Image (cartoon, rainbow, N blue to C red):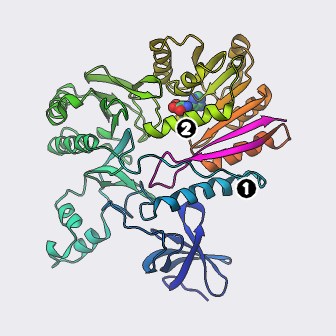
Amino acid sequence: MYKKKQMVEVEILDLGDKNQCFGRLNDGMSIFVQGTAAVGDTVMAEIFKIKKKYLVSRFRKLVKPSPHRIDPICPYFGLCGGCKWQHMDYSEQLRLKQKQVQDALKHIGGFSDVECEPCRPAPELFGYRNKMDFSFTDLRYLSPEEIKHQDTKNSKLGDLSALSAASVKKPLDFALGFHAPGCYAKAIDLDHCDLSTEAMNLALNTTRAFCLHHKKELPIYSTRSHTGELRNLMVRQGGHTGDFMVNLITSTHKPELMQELCTDLVAALGDRLTTFVNNTTTAKNTASFGEKEFVLHGPGFITDRLGDYTYRISANSFFQTNTAQAETLYTLILEMAQLKSSDVVYDLFCGTGSIALFASGHCKKVLGVELVESSVNDARENATRHNVENCEFIQLDLKDIKLIEDDMRNFGHPDVIITDPPRAGMNPRAVKMLKKIAPPTLIYVSCNPASLARDGQMLCEEGQYQLVSCQPVDMFPQTNHVESVARFERT
Ligand SMILES: C[S@@+](CC[C@H](N)C(=O)[O-])C[C@H]1O[C@@H](n2cnc3c(N)ncnc32)[C@H](O)[C@@H]1O
């Protein structure tokens, strides 16, 4: 009989669902271990949930490290929901990413006979992100040391680690950073992130200092009361161009304060600051998407380069977050699409038209489809600036299958569809639409293996399509996320 709070020793055999580790106890009982264990570790874990066929526990102590275990470089590792795999060497991260895709295809999609290719490695393991999205919260997430310190009346600062000693002085009702896993109301107050660039960290700290100084005039937006101003800080830096954007998302626009912040950002970043925009929204969520935009410095957009193309990127527009690896991804998409010069191509969920432009020189014409207005405008501008005349972009919601049917009649039936939906995958109606349009080749680009497997299963369930290949690509080193490109052929 197992009991809650019981400590057990277990060897980690595999990764399970939701980034939990998996092992088996001596009597054969399955156990999931949450926290920073790694495959190959032997750990002490504390049981907190007991089910008939399995236990769920928390990692408490390392008994014997996996040969792939390394020291994480980030002091926030284990607290922050960002880099969950910093404690594994890169070869192990790649192995697990490939396995994640392979397992999803097999167990969710039912594709047991498709061998997934090894995951393509990224050229940079840190500092690779061209966009960071930090959240403001009025509940700062406390580390276990800080909680201990608060509970121990006579405790001295000297008892704590360097990180905690600094953070003890921080207010409890202000944080600008990332959410802790499973704790959406709170955020860890970060002063840097190893996935971002030095300039991004500088913009983060400059904005924090300004907002703390103006705490009364700029209260943090509360998701409980839906009052307050400060919501998100998004920073973007073109991976190839170095162009730099700061985008502060607030509830309303306060012209004088934003001008003051602009002065601080220019003083800190100098010529590196390309543009500063303030986006406002009345939405009752924390998405960093603006309804109104106020440009305080520069043109209101940045540019970045992928291959032979430079792209205009506005604050609300989607752009792949790892510039160097986006080139690998797009080259791979073209390889897998095997385009012919006579092909009509659809680029669904096209963002700023980056895949469409890459494809435009290899086919007859491309129709890009995208929901967000600023992305569609950027896509059109990006085609124009490169004198690309065989791409058309339309703004529509891909849940609305009727609309695309009209556009399809005008543009021509596709030979190849490239679809690159958000994490949740495609709406079932959109998958049905694909089956109705039935192009000979479908390329599915996915940042979520489970969505790829689910939508792929739906595409293939009546035998109309078959999955012929799948290539994972690592766009997000140190995290448990993986991108993949799958080729489906009409039978
Ligand atoms: C993963 S991104 C891909 C963007 C682009 N293919 C690229 O590589 O940069 C997904 C895109 O789908 C768009 N999107 C989300 N929901 C949509 C919908 N219902 N209809 C059309 N586009 C949508 C988002 O705005 C975003 O630009």
The disc, 1 or 2, on the residue closer to the chain's N-terminal end is 1
Left/right of residue 106 with respect to residue 41 in the rendered view: right
Q: Position of residue 409 (x, y in %)?
A: 74, 13
Label for residue 439? none
Residue at position x 43%, y 39% from top?
287
Q: Please state which of the two labelled residues, at mark 1 or mark 2, is closer to the viewer.
A: 2
Q: Is residue 28 in view from this perspective?
A: yes
Q: Label 2: which residue? A: 329
Whether residue 475 is in magenta: the answer is: yes
- Label 1 to label 2: alpha-carbon separation: 23 Å
Is 82 drawn above or below residue 447 in the view shown? below
Range of magenta residues:
467-491
Whether residue 447 is in magenta: the answer is: no
Quadrant of the displayed image that contains ligand 1:
top right
Amino acid tagged 1: Lys
Q: Position of residue 110 (x, y in %)?
A: 77, 53
Is 378 drawn above or below residue 42 in the view shown? above
Residue at position x 63%, y 19% from top?
366
Q: Is mark 2 within 8 Å of ligand 1?
A: yes
Q: Position of residue 258 (x, y in %)?
A: 21, 29
Front residue (pair 260, 119): 119
Question: Which residue occupies the extreme bottom position in the image?
Answer: 1
**Which SS does the magenta portion mostly show?**
strand
Residue at position x 29%, y 27% from top?
277
Q: Label 1: which residue? A: 106
